[in-house]
Every structure is written in structure tokens, then in C-alpha cells.
Image (spheres, rainbow, N blue to C red):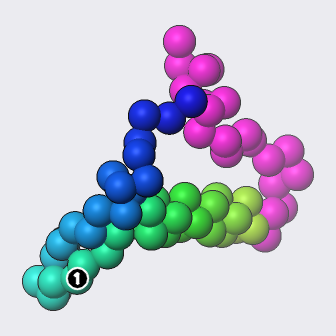
């Protein structure tokens, strides 16, 4: 269960990129971007490993990785 209310995820915040350009975005959109971006890079990593001929691809799931560090 989440404690985030609809109002809190609709909150618009301002941020600055590396080029010092300012942007505004609701929190729910930034969360969507972060999750999609991570998925994109996981796919890139697996593709690169396969191109290198690696057949046994290691687990790339963050939850798996954090559990293995305990």
C-alpha cells in the first residue's frame, strides 16, 4: 500500500539538466521516466552481453541484486 496521495504525485517540480536548462514536470511523469529509462539500459546491457557471445546472462533485476548483497 502506498502513502502517496494523488495530489502528491501530481505535484509539479522544477529541475535543471547538465546544460543548466530548467524544466518542470509532475512527479508521476518523472517516476515513469525513471522506470522506463532503467528498463531501457537493462535491455542494452543484455544485448551487449549477447553480442559478446555470453550465453549465460547474469541476473539484472535490481530486487534480485539487493537480496544477493545481504
Q: Is residue 22 above or below residue 10?
A: below
Q: Is residue 54 left or right of residue 68?
A: right
Foreground of the two, 69 or 56? 69
The residue that appears at 43% across and 34% down in the rendered structure is: 3
Q: Is residue 12 left or right of residue 43?
A: left
Is residue 65 one of those drawn in magenta? yes
The residue that appears at 62% across and 32% down in the rendered structure is: 63
Is residue 33 one of those drawn in magenta? no
- Res. 53 image quadrant: bottom right
Foreground of the two, 51 or 39? 39
Where residue 7 sits in the image (x, y, percent)?
A: 35, 55
Quadrant of the snapshot with the N terminus? top right
Whether residue 34 is visible here, answered yes or no, is no
Tag 1's secondary structure?
strand
Q: Is residue 19 above or below residue 53?
A: below
Q: Is residue 69 above or below residue 38?
A: above
User: Which range is magenta?
Assistant: 50-70
The residue labelled by disc 1 is 23
Where residue 9 sits in the image (x, y, percent)?
A: 39, 56
Whether residue 25 is visible here, answered yes or no, is yes
- Res. 62 image quadrant: top right
The residue that appears at 85% across and 44% down in the rendered structure is: 56
Q: Is residue 61 left or right of residue 55?
A: left
Q: Is residue 65 above or below residue 58?
A: above
- Res. 19 image quadrant: bottom left
Where residue 49 sits in the image (x, y, percent)?
A: 73, 60
The residue that appears at 53% across and 19% down in the rendered structure is: 69
Foreground of the two, 1 or 22? 1
Where residue 28 sits in the image (x, y, percent)?
A: 44, 62
Name the residue furthest top: 70
The mark total stands at: 1
Name the residue furthest left: 20
Amino acid at each position: 500500500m502506498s502513502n502517496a496521495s494523488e495530489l502528491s504525485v501530481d505535484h509539479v517540480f522544477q529541475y535543471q539538466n547538465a546544460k543548466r536548462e530548467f524544466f518542470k514536470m509532475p512527479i508521476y511523469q518523472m517516476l515513469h521516466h525513471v522506470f522506463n529509462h532503467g528498463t531501457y539500459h537493462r535491455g542494452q546491457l543484455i544485448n551487449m552481453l549477447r553480442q559478446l557471445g555470453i550465453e549465460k546472462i547474469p541476473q539484472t533485476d535490481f530486487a534480485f541484486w539487493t537480496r544477493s548483497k545481504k
